[in-house]
Image (cartoon, grey):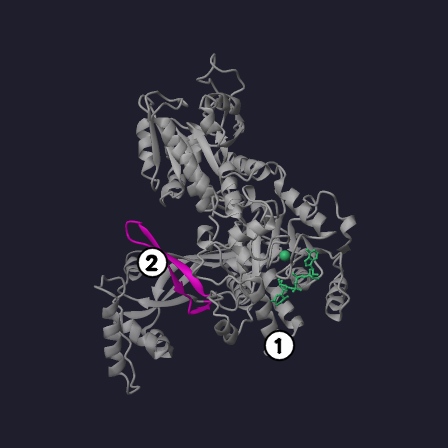
Amino acid sequence: MGKQEERNQQKIEKKKPRFLCLHGFRTNGQIMKTQIEKWPPSVLEKLDLVFVDAPFPANGKSDVEGIFDPPYYEWFQFNKEFTEYTNFDECLAYIEDYMVEHGPFDGLLGFSQGAILSAALPGLQAEGVTLTKVPKINFLVIIGGAKLKEPSLAEKAYSCPIRCPSLHFLGETDFLKPYGTELLESFVDPVVIHHPKGHTVPRLDDKGLPTMLDFVERIQKAGLYSRTGFRRWCSGSGEVRGMASRPVSSVESLESSDSITYLSQREAAEIDETLMGPLCFSVDQLMELAGLSVATAIAEVYRSSEYNRVLAICGPGNNGGDGLVAARHLYHFGYKPVVCYPKRTPKPLYDGLVIQLESLSVPFLLAEDLPMDISNDFDILVDAMFGFSFHGTPRPPFDDLIQRLVSLQKRDHMRQKPPVVISIDIPSGWHVEEGDINGDGIKPDMLVSLTAPKLCAKRFCGPHHFLGGRFVPPSIVEKFNLKLPPYPSTSMCVRIGKPPQVDISALRENYISPELREDQVEADPLAQFEKWFADAVAACLKEPNAMALSTADKSGKPSSRIVLLKGVDKDGFVWYTNYESQKAREISENPRASLLFYWGGLNRQVRVEGLVEKVSEEESEQYFHSRPRGSQIGAIVSKQSTVIPGRNILHLEYKELEAKFSDRSLIPKPKHWGGYRLKPEHFEFWQGQQSRLHDRIRYSPEVTDGKRVWKIDRLAP
Ligand SMILES: NC(=O)C1=CN([C@@H]2O[C@H](COP(=O)(O)OP(=O)(O)OC[C@H]3O[C@@H](n4cnc5c(N)ncnc54)[C@H](O)[C@@H]3O)[C@@H](O)[C@H]2O)[C@H](O)CC1
Ligand SMILES: [K+]
């Protein structure tokens, strides 16, 4: 073994994996510490243990009263069956904040309720439910644990096998033993220490101690390759680089490395040179597209109605230029940008970008004029300080600006929503290839990689990773052997990370719509419908004529489906279908039906209710022959709503008929195909407004002075 290797080996021997220790229900961190400290020094000296109190004061009697002194705390509350929890989200947020503030941690060590949490957290973290701002949990010690039973949490926590090394204590007389045993099934290769005691933190006996020491040795070795291992157990940039150049597969990324190419700093610069050299792109062009991609990615995730105040912090190079361009587009998208651009580059390109922003009255702030606490003044912070040409450590004033972003994210945000941080191409201050080497850099919520992600993006743990810069021609893809995802439709950006978990109950829109007053709407609901329909067409909404048709059979059993409106006039709303379908059968039994148009892009819906009748055979005939021949054949082939053995049968019949009518002869309309017309009796126009105070305008028929007129009412939302 050479001298250097020997030194490394010594370092390996000295390193201590750092565990966050979560105590049991209605106890506290100090109590757990007292119990764990009964373990022999041969174990304790190899571990760095941090004990934290749970967030909620005990909401009832503690089992350790009279044995250990109060105060007592609990992590969350639960029902008798342990299937419903209170304060669970708050508990997760509390743990995450603690780990951000006091971390990084390599593993979790939990007892009882703390063990239940510890065992669930790796799965919840992998699913993006929590701990998105901290490194991956690498090791677990579970004492008297069990599974969470709340179904949606359990699904996320245990649906994938938990691969991190784990040590489980099972007590012979512990009431939780059957549940702790069941928990083992969720782990790949769990190590188990059986002890004769009950629900307690046991001492380590002759059998348990060697198992424990083996486990500690195993995780010490594994720690050398772990994400936190880079930070805690190595010092000096040379060594860190050495470590990082080990196969990247040892550092797990949230994204699959096979599906996308990550660029080294040199490759990124080479691509840039090829674009601007042989391919004759100007930097202005690329910057405009890059900045536009960033603005569209931001708008896709953070709506201007909720996240309006933007601060773009721009650096001296092209990354800063991307920030200036993004700020301009965000302005046009309805955001209120402010720019901090402390080291201006005296080149016409940058001067122009500044003038364009000034012409929009976008304020420029000096770094020293930024408020000390930027969290109150902004909803979005765009980090456009450094891109792929960054090296070394940030120099003033960027060191301080980066630090502000870091400390902002470390603060206690239990009470106030913090601004989100969006990094362009590289989280500023991160090593372009190795990422956040010391673990104390910024942790953006969103990263917009440009052209292709750089190697450091593998370490990005935030919830939103996008790719922008839709300008890479096939020749560059080929030359650099790039694997890039396709961009959807005409979009300037594409999400590349795992989509974040969505809490359905928290999905809500704060609508902003024009005024809709009962004294201003059309007297005739059909005219009002035509006006709104024209708005939907003008807004380029997809299929504005799509409507949900609800029918009911004679017993009143309802059913709904989307059909396409094919005509509307004073006689009613027309659509075509198969007269042998379920809806046709229901209409024949019960002619009452309801139509619903939903134009989400305009925050509008229209309900139309009335009686349905068939249109004339002649009208159906005429419409049938106006349709593309493929649709005409399709209508013959489909015996709508009947069970068929497979899709293939449709193709076979279609091919047969296509051949039969290949001479362009008239395709006869099948007897069972035709139109329906709904004659409206009631209309309701709905428009979303702020704070759920939506508009609802109803039209119902009434007879006044012997004349049939429409009565207009406003309904409560
Ligand atoms: N092809 C593309 O993908 C495109 C990317 N774009 C963006 O351009 C940047 C790369 O731009 P570049 O000007 O080469 O570099 P930077 O923005 O990273 O800034 C370099 C700048 O910063 C100074 N600097 C370097 N290190 C430090 C330090 N430690 N402290 C202080 N200052 C430092 C250096 O002197 C330069 O002045 C890429 O990431 C994309 O964002 C294009 O806009 C479009 C094409
Ligand atoms: K950046």
Q: Closest to the observer: 681 or 76?
A: 76
Identify the residue position indicated by label 2 in the image.
591
Magenta: main secondary structure equals strand
Q: Which residues are magenta?
A: 545-570
Q: Closest to the observer: 671 or 287?
A: 287
The crowding category of the residue bearing disc 1, from other C-alpha atoms within 10 Å (few below 14, some 14 to 19, many at least 20), is few
Residue type at mark 1 is Gly
Q: Nearer the viewer, mark 1 or mark 2?
A: 1
Task: Point out residue 681 in the picture as x, y percentages from the top left corner.
Answer: 44, 57
User: Could you tell whether 83 is left or right of 506 in the image?
Assistant: left
Task: Point out residue 13 in the picture as x, y percentages from the top left corner.
Answer: 49, 38
Identify the residue position indicated by label 1 in the image.
277
- For marks 1 and 2 on the same chain, the one whose residue lies earlier in the sequence: 1
Q: Is residue 332 visible?
A: yes
User: Could you tell whether 379 is left or right of 201 in the image?
Assistant: right
Task: Point out residue 603 in the picture as x, y percentages from the top left corner.
Answer: 54, 56
Task: Point out residue 514 in the picture as x, y percentages from the top left corner.
Answer: 62, 56
Q: Closest to the observer: 210 or 290?
A: 210
